Image: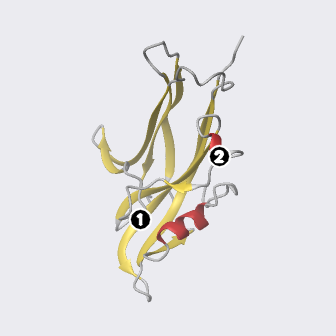
């Protein structure tokens, strides 16, 4: 997809609120990339009295640089991801949590994984998302109802250009991206 589209995630607003004071995000960059999902899975592992239930997901995608003359990026290629969750693992969320930027911390907006790499001797870019959530019901908590968790995200390829705009902000060109999510729901007999 070329531009963020999930109205519940509010990608542009979430990104701007977190880092708009230091970065100028430019959407709809002219470069084109082809994304290829290499693996995508969701897992739920039954817990025991001693081990927690484990929920998780894994996504791995690669992209080929723009093959047109002059079409490749000149700056560092990174990823920006905005996500939100809902379900019994986050009871305060109600219909869903507030969208959040999944970055490396307070210093920059970029996702901690992904960028340029080599696969079988060919230059490609990649993006990897992996999470595993342990959950254990503790004695004395009573029946909390069925376990559920819902995760949605949009991740966009972004070029940290190394340039500054007229106001002194670092310019980041936001290219195409992908939308993904996963859901786990406990089924009781």
Which dot marks residue 159? 1
Residue 54 shows in this picture? yes
67 left or right of 12 in image: left
Rendering coords of residue 55 (x, y %): 52, 28
Q: In the displayed structure, would residue 101 be above or below residue 173? A: above
Rendering coords of residue 151 (x, y %): 59, 41
Write the residue at 42% across / 76% down: 22
60 left or right of 144 in image: left
Which residue is under mark 2?
A: 93
Mark 1 neighbour density, 10 Å: few (under 14) some (14–19) many (20 or more): many
SS under mark 2? helix
Q: Which circle's residue, 1 or 2, is located before the other in the chain? A: 2
Among all residues in the image, which is located at the extreme left? 121
Viewer-nearest residue: 13 or 166: 13
Which dot marks residue 91? none
Rendering coords of residue 132 (x, y %): 45, 32
Among all residues in the image, which is located at the extreme bottom? 166
Viewer-nearest residue: 169 or 184: 184
Rendering coords of residue 32 (x, y %): 51, 59
Write the residue at 38% across / 63% down: 106
SS under mark 1? strand
Q: Can you say which quadrant of the picture contains the C terminus?
A: top right
The answer to whether mark 1 and mark 2 are in CB contact below 8 A is no
């Amino acid at each position: 997809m070329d531009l963020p589209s999930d109205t519940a995630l509010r990608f542009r607003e979430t990104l701007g609120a977190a880092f708009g004071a230091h970065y100028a995000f430019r959407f709809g960059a002219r470069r084109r990339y082809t994304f290829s999902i290499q693996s995508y899975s969701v897992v739920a592992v039954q817990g025991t009295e001693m081990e927690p239930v484990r929920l998780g997901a894994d996504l791995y995608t690669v992209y080929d640089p723009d093959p047109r003359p002059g079409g490749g990026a000149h700056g560092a290629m990174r990823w920006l991801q905005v996500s939100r969750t809902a379900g019994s693992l986050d009871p305060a969320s109600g219909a869903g949590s507030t969208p959040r930027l999944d970055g490396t911390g307070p210093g920059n907006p970029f996702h901690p994984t992904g960028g340029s790499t080599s696969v079988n001797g060919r230059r490609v870019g990649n993006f990897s998302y992996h999470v595993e959530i342990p959950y254990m019901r503790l004695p004395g908590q009573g029946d909390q109802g069925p376990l559920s968790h819902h995760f949605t995200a949009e991740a966009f390829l972004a070029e940290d250009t190394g340039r500054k705009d007229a106001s002194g902000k670092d310019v980041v060109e936001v290219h195409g991206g992908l939308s993904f999510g996963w859901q786990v729901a406990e089924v009781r007999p």
